[in-house]
Amino acid sequence: GGPKIKLNNGSEIPLIGLGTWQAKPGEVAKAVEFAIKEAGYRHIDCAWAYGNEKEVGEGIKASGIPRSEVFVTSKLWGTYHSRVEECLDQTLGNLGLDYLDLYLVHWPVPMNPKGNHPVFPLLPNGKRDVEHTWPLSETWKQMEAVLKKGKVKSIGVSNFSQAKMEEILQSAEIIPVVDQLELHVYNPQHKLISYLKEKKIVPQAYSPLGSTNSPLLSDETVLRLAGKHSLQPADVLLGYLITKGIVALPKSVTPARIAANFNGATFAAEKLQPEDVESLDALAAAGKQKRFITPPWPVDLGFEHWPPL
Ligand code: A2P
């Protein structure tokens, strides 16, 4: 299952997980089955909104590995902030599971549950139909309730800046175990990472390779370090995160890459030296700062380097 890290509630999470966003139904079941059965993954990252949970669940089952040995995460969609258990029940039904290891609030943006679209309700002006009056603290209360009921073993958040985290921490009974963010060498969010560390919240990296057609894979410094240690560029990018105690969630539906990412990440984390990590740490500040995933939410999420609303 590869290296693990302890969460603030005592549970352990594998540091490498398979991402499933943009993995199409029709290819994702095979990818998940391969990742678990052949490549050694014990951690799968899903979401209600990805629209492929049924196939992900089929892949988990087809792997033949006992449920208790696989760490499964999913995420609450914005139109369900006021009905957390309903979204969770759909996810559990889709996946064919009776509990999740981890459930996350996908974005700190509640959307109109009665809007004109189940995923992205829009206002007549074309902007996303956001429920501005729904407090995130209420969403979090419902997350705590499904945890207490035993339907999920841990709860956390995703895409939460420090400002949004503080909105829920004020009244939280249970501290989120993770914050899943766009994290990679071009968007390292150093300040937010040290805040999370102080709060004992583990960061998780989505798009750790820089998403589709990534310029990170041909970055000069990444290539230099790959050459230095006989690694692939993807190994360097993933190893960088692992050495920092950041959970990496590389997405792939290609068997060779699924396997290479798992082995390479573990191997690279052992090879990278402090000076290598320092040179990767410095890339963003040296003019390479870049976010790849910035949905047009009509609210200020409080992130650095987010495009203007
Ligand atoms: P594919 O799924 O077709 O294999 P991220 O995890 O940063 O979102 O990156 C996912 C993208 O990177 C996908 O397009 C995926 O393609 C591709 N990818 C995944 N692993 C590798 C790798 N080891 N080398 C090159 N590209 C990769």
Image: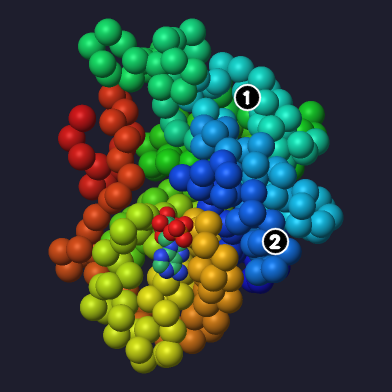
Determine if residue 7 is in view.
Answer: no
Q: Is residue 115 above or below residue 20?
A: above
Determine if residue 273 is in view.
Answer: yes
Amino acid type at image mark 2: Ile
Residue depicted at x 61% and y 17% = 83
Q: Is residue 167 above or below residue 194?
A: above
Q: Is residue 137 above or below residue 237?
A: above
Instruction: Give the x, y percent position of residue 112.
Output: 44, 13
Is label 2's Cβ within 8 Å of ligand 1? no
Label 1 environment density (alpha carbons within 10 Å; few <14, some 14–19, many ≥20):
some
- Split into 4 quadrants, where in the image is the N terminus? bottom right
Q: Which mark is residue 87?
A: 1
Element carrying mark 1: helix
Amino acid type at image mark 1: Cys
Whether pointer 1 and pointer 2 mark residues with C-beta atoms closer than 8 Å, the reply is: no
- Split into 4 quadrants, where in the image is the C terminus? top left
Instruction: Give the x, y percent position of residue 278.
Output: 33, 77
Residue 211 lies left or right of residue 3; in this view the side is left
Nearest the viewer among 235 and 57 is 57
Residue depicted at x 23% and y 78% = 220
Task: Determine which quarter of the picture holds residue 129.
Answer: top left
Q: Is residue 195 above or below residue 244?
A: above
Q: Which mark is residue 36?
A: 2
